Image (cartoon, rainbow, N blue to C red):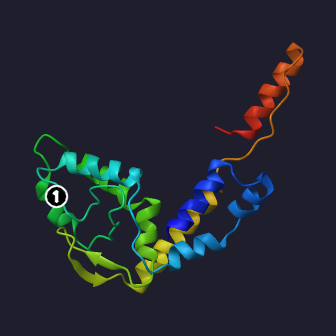
Amino acid sequence: MSWVRDVEWRILGGDIPETLRTAMCQNSSTTKSKLNSSGPVLAREREVAKTEAINALLTRPIAILPAKVGDPVRPFALGLWSEIRPLLKPEISVSTLRKALATYVHSRSYRIATARPGSVRHDINAEPVEPVSDADRLDAQQKYESFKAREGPRSPKLAAPLSTPTSKTEAIRVTLLRRKDNPR
């Protein structure tokens, strides 16, 4: 699998011609392979940051959350909230914990981990409990697809460099074009 990461790095790093990079970024089969792959979904820096924030709200870290980059992202067992809630530090509000957990379970990686065939739910100690139901798997797939539709391609648009403005009118035009290319 390291060659796949090497290819992705080259694409993002700019070693591949722009036309090929654009064509590869528009390939929709990569989504299908993420959802249909059988291996574990590995945590990235984003997920680790979210789990660190969750664990900071608790009296002790919980094992189901990835502790470092490369740890697997595991779907939660149904009813896990009742096990996590008592671990909340007394000075922290319940709504803060709910928001932190919601941010994690609504993430792209968590959705992929839940949507994959053969995925299994885990308890608070990261022990497998039960397989993810077909209905939950389908729901996760649909929500992941709606993520993609909302966000569009994950790679940044490759904009053509604009010439240096020669007049005030030209400077305004260039600024407006940049805003059009990079919506807020």
Give the x, y percent position of residue 150: 61, 57
Please tell me whether residue 36 is drawn above or below residue 50 in the rendered image. Answer: below
Q: Is residue 23 left or right of residue 1?
A: right
In depth, the one of 159 and 19 nearer the eye is 19
Where is residue 26, by image quadrant?
bottom right
Give the x, y percent position of residue 67: 26, 56
> Can residue 154 be seen here?
no
Quarter of the figure with the C terminus: top right
Residue depicted at 44% across the width and 81% down the height:
38
Return the residue found at the far top.
168
Give the x, y percent position of residue 35: 51, 75
Q: Is residue 59 left or right of residue 174?
A: left
Where is residue 69, by image quadrant?
bottom left
Q: Is residue 79 left or right of residue 112?
A: left
Residue depicted at 82% across the width and 21% down the height:
172
Q: How many numbered discs sit on the rendered protein? A: 1
Q: Is residue 6 left or right of residue 68?
A: right
> Can residue 45 be seen here?
yes
Give the x, y percent position of residue 53: 28, 46
How many residues crowd mark 1 within 10 Å: few (<14), some (14–19), many (20+)? few
Disc 1: which residue: 85
> Which SS class for mark 1?
helix
* Amino acid of disc 1: Arg
Residue depicted at 32% across the width and 63% down the height:
71
